[in-house]
């Protein structure tokens, strides 16, 4: 029996590859709304971030999520990311 394939995704800040479940997905829907997708299954364009507060800070300062998702990312999204990492 073949071993189960683990999906890998790339962090938009560090450019490192990690298993999908080790990253947090931020998604932009068709209407341009941005939200944190903890399930990893929401419809829309997704960007992955490493579960690290420093990475979230870098993403905020460099606007990496805004460049990748091509939309303005509200401050509440970064706060929700930090909250999800802490819990």
Image: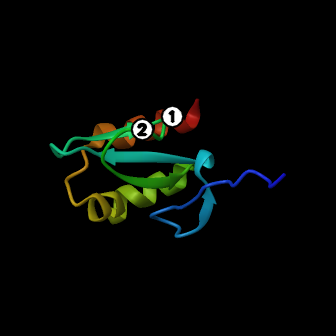
Q: CA distance from mark 2 to mark 1?
A: 10 Å
Marks 2 and 1, the one that precedes in the sequence: 2
Asked if residue 11 is positioned above or below residue 36 in the image, the reply reads below
Q: Nearer the viewer, residue 82 or 66?
A: 66
Asked if residue 23 is positioned above or below residue 41 in the image, the reply reads below
* Residue reaching furthest to the right: 1
Pointer 2: what residue? Answer: 37
Task: Check disc 1 and report its element: helix, strand or loop.
Answer: helix
| Count of numbered labels shown in the rendering | 2
Asked if residue 62 is positioned above or below residue 81 in the image, the reply reads below
Pointer 1: what residue? Answer: 84
Q: Nearer the viewer, residue 49 or 31?
A: 31
Task: Check disc 2 and report its element: helix, strand or loop.
Answer: strand
Q: Is disc 2 in contact with disc 1, using a CB cutoff of under 8 Å?
A: no
Q: Residues within 10 Å of mark 1 (few under 14, many from 20)?
A: some
Residue, x 15% and y 43% (percent of image)? 31
The answer to whether 18 appears left or right of 59 in the picture is right
Q: Position of residue 22 (x, y in %)?
A: 62, 48
* Residue reaching furthest to the front: 1
The answer to whether 23 appears left or right of 36 in the picture is right
**Quadrant containing the C terminus in the rendered view:** top right
- Residue 66 is marked as none
Residue, x 28% and y 42% (percent of image)? 75
Q: Residues within 10 Å of mark 2 (few under 14, many from 20)?
A: some
The answer to whether 44 appears left or right of 15 in the picture is left
* Residue reaching furthest to the bottom: 15
């Amino acid at each position: 029996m073949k071993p189960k394939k683990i999906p890998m995704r790339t962090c938009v800040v560090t450019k490192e590859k990690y298993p999908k479940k080790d990253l947090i997905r931020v998604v932009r829907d068709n209407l341009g709304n941005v939200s944190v997708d903890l399930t990893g299954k929401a419809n829309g364009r997704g960007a992955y971030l490493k579960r690290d507060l420093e990475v979230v800070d870098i993403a905020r300062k460099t606007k990496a999520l805004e460049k990748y998702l091509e939309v303005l990312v509200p401050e509440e999204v970064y706060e929700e990311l930090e909250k999800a990492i802490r819990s």
